[in-house]
Image (cartoon, grey):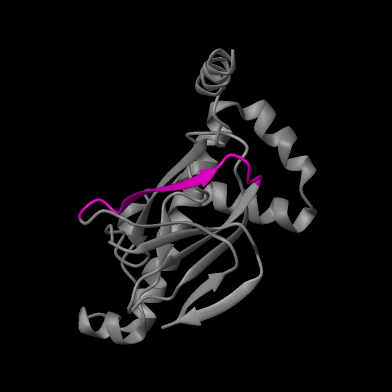
């Protein structure tokens, strides 16, 4: 009788489901040099907290490390893995010789969604810029011009894709924001690549 009971208990334990772990959500993106637009191999980390813990070699760290990875050499591509039980996360991007970057409150409600923004751009330090044969001011200009070109091109596309909805949506912005968006959209109608070099 006791042997039969023991067998029954063992069978029950073997058949009982294991406690399921929360699935992991994937968030992919790419890292690039803000000035040149070329991909870079840098470190990407995800934290569960916005509470700053420390900083090592200029790279900030926060409480609750969730994942740490490096972007691929040659493509700059990376994927952060965050447990689905975490509603949002803090992303940190670092590379020696570049200014680090932090994003707070990134959404983790869905799997297989890109990081925001994508691509992530990192500005080279003045020392690295000079080592690459470019003046730091020129490096900053190119980074600004490249970022503006992307915004201008996107706004021009959106205004042409659904013109009616685009201009109605502009009414949701303040007058100053709307004026700035109108200027950027107008610039997007021009040929952008020819405007990247810094004027002398």
Image coordinates of residue 34 in percent, x first then y, are 38, 65
Task: Say if 145 sits above or below 133 in the image.
Answer: above
* Residue at 58 percent of width and 32 percent of height: 19
Q: Quadrant of the N terminus?
A: top right
User: Is residue 28 in the magenta section?
Assistant: no
Q: Quadrant of the C terminus?
A: bottom left
* Residue at 45 percent of width and 51 percent of height: 150
User: Is residue 80 in the magenta section?
Assistant: yes
Task: Say if 168 sits above or below 64 in the image.
Answer: above
Give whichever of 154, 124 is nearer the camera.
Answer: 124
- 59 sits to left or right of 176: left
* Residue at 55 percent of width and 43 percent of height: 83
Location of residue 63 by image quarter: bottom right
Which span of residues is magenta-colored? Answer: 74-87
- 142 sits to left or right of 176: left
- 179 sits to left or right of 22: right
Give whichever of 57, 159 is nearer the camera.
Answer: 57
Image coordinates of residue 126 in percent, x first then y, are 35, 85
Location of residue 180 by image quarter: bottom right
Give whichever of 12, 96 is nearer the camera.
Answer: 12
């Amino acid at each position: 009788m006791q042997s039969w009971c023991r067998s029954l208990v063992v069978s029950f334990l073997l058949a009982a489901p294991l406690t399921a772990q929360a699935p992991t959500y994937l968030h992919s993106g790419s890292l690039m040099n803000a000035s040149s637009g070329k991909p870079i191999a840098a470190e990407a980390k995800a934290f569960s907290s916005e509470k700053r813990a420390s900083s090592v070699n200029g790279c900030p760290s926060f409480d609750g490390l969730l994942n740490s990875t490096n972007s691929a050499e040659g493509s700059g591509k990376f994927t952060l893995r965050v447990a689905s039980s975490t509603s949002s996360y803090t992303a940190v991007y670092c590379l020696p010789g570049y200014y680090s970057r932090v994003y707070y409150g990134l959404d983790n409600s869905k799997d297989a969604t890109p990081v925001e923004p994508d691509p992530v751009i990192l500005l080279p330090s003045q020392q690295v810029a000079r080592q690459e044969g470019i003046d730091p001011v020129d490096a900053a200009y190119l980074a600004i011009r490249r970022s503006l070109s992307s915004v201008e091109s996107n706004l021009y596309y959106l205004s042409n894709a659904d013109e009616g909805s685009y201009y109605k949506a502009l009414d949701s912005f303040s007058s100053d924001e709307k004026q700035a968006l109108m200027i950027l959209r107008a610039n997007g109608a021009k040929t952008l690549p020819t405007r990247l070099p810094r004027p002398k």
